[in-house]
Amino acid sequence: MKKNLKKLVSLVLVVVLAMSMAACGSAKAEKDANAGSADQLSTEQLFEKIKTTSTDVDGITMTGNVDLALKIKISSDGVDGKAEMGISGAIEAKASMEPKASYMKGEFTADLLGQKQEMEYENYAVENGDSMDVYTNEEGEWSYEEDDISEYSGMLQGLQSSLKDVSFADLKKYCTDITSDLKKGNYTIVAKMDGKKLLDMAEEAGADTSSLGMDFSSIPDFTVIITVVVDAEKYLPQSMSVALDMDKFELQGATYELTKCSIEFTVDSYDAVTITVPDEALAAKDE
């Protein structure tokens, strides 16, 4: 369960961050006549601004909240059974470019069929020569592993690499409806995006959705509604929220209904950060 939670948290981060950049880059001005004016940039101008500023970021610090709830109905031999599942919690994440390093911490409460379980996950990854030292705390115990630095793609590195290679036309294919508005020094962008295509995006970014133990191909089409607030002077996302528009669906003889989906992130800083591994985590390297 905790290993799947770790994978879920990582997937949420990758998807939300990738979607936020896609939504920013694909924003469509409400009135094309005003596009390119001094007050509001055109879609493509806004995208180019975000690409430039995002690739120059040296560090990022974020905080977020996740609140998900699911109703399940199972019918067997004429008898209906009902159950509810949910997970809520907070995420803290930060990353730096030089040296390459990242930190993520998640504290969650899972309600599984009426049984509540508290879960925590903490992870450090820091550059060490030609490798990455990775320290993970699960169930109160620290573990250590060494990864090849050439295979490392952290939060910032992955986003910057994706933005560098993607074009404005590429991003538009994920969106079914997009509006943006410039008020009080910020762009507010609302994007409705194809959920199946976003899962494909997450896998392309390195998230292994199959390892979560669910066949996402069995889930019907759904829409992800993303709201992103972007600083109109710095052209960097300041906050992001995600909601889902999904009908009930059947899977393996059960009916599922998503009753709550709230994923929110706030960027606290784009300044360079220092990530220091605590002594208790470092001790795991010597064991």
Image (cartoon, rainbow, N blue to C red):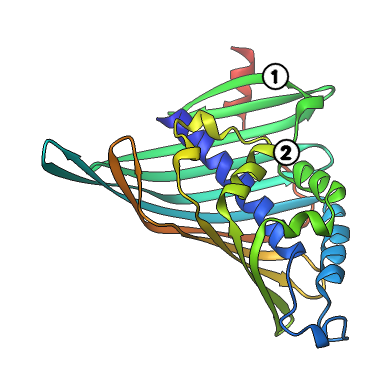
Nearest the viewer among 28 and 14 is 28
Q: Secondary structure at mark 2?
A: loop
Nearest the viewer among 251 and 36 is 251
Q: Residue 185: x, y in percent?
A: 74, 81
Q: In this figure, which residue is indicated by the disc labeled 1?
A: 146
Q: Residue at x 56, y 46 (%)?
A: 12
Tag 1: amino acid: Glu
Tag 2: amino acid: Gly
- Image height of 103 relative to 70, above or below: above
Position of 206 with respect to 100 (left or right) is left
Q: Residue at x 83, y 77 (%)?
A: 41
Q: Residue 30: x, y in percent?
A: 71, 82
Q: Is residue 269 visible?
A: no
Q: In this figure, which residue is indicated by the disc labeled 2?
A: 154
Q: Residues within 10 Å of mark 1 (few under 14, many from 20)?
A: some
Which residue reaches farthest left? 78
Q: Which mark is residue 252?
A: none
Q: Residue 124: x, y in percent?
A: 64, 34
